[in-house]
Image (cartoon, rainbow, N blue to C red):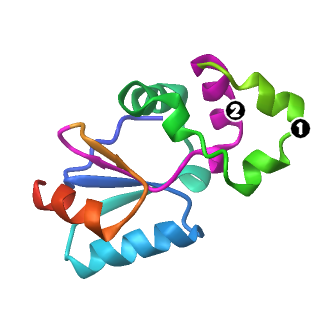
Amino acid sequence: MAENTSTRPLTMYGIKNCDTIKKARKYLDAQGMDYQFHDYRADGVDAELLQRFMDTLGWQALLNTRGTTWRKLEESERNAVDNPAAALKVMLAQPAIIKRPLLCAADGSMLLGFSEATYSPFIQEK
């Protein structure tokens, strides 16, 4: 997968049918922000991009252990995710297990999750 070469200042990563993604997109649209949406399911996610996210945010932050996808894993699979390499492997195999939304700015800064309180200052800087 190619690196994002969009001239847009922001890229949102996630899954389009996620309720939190819908709220975050609605907020950005209401603010008149120009952004690109990258759907993990439709557009894919590769190890290099995911590693960049992990290097910045940490694998524990990116791994959504509260969602349905995590709970559907066998207990042995969940127990095996105890290091960056194992987390990378499971996130590549199951992109829905990646916490979302992930908002990335052209300057490399990232914001994980959504709340108006955190988005407002982040997008004002961009």
Q: Label 2: state its secondary structure.
A: helix
Query: In the figure, is residue 83 to the left or right of 78?
Result: left
The amino acid at mark 2 is Val
Q: Is residue 41 above or below residue 84?
A: below
Identify the residue at horizontal 30%, vertical 70% (top origin). Answer: 116
| Mark positioned earlier in the residue sequence (1 or 2) | 1
Q: Which residue is mark 2?
A: 90
Please state the horizontal and vertical placement of residue 111, each as a whole percent of the image. 33, 48
Query: In the figure, is residue 105 to the left or right of 11?
Result: left
Identify the residue at horizontal 54%, vertical 66% (top origin). Answer: 16
Q: Which residue is mark 1?
A: 74
Comparing marks 1 and 2, which lies closer to the viewer? 1
Residue 23 sits inside the magenta stretch: no
Residue in front for this viewpoint, 93 or 57: 57
Q: Residues within 10 Å of mark 2 (few under 14, many from 20)?
A: many
Question: Which residue range is magenta in the image?
Answer: 84-107
The amino acid at mark 1 is Glu
Identify the residue at horizontal 56%, vertical 50% (top origin). Answer: 40
Kindly identify which numbered label has been placed on residue 56. none
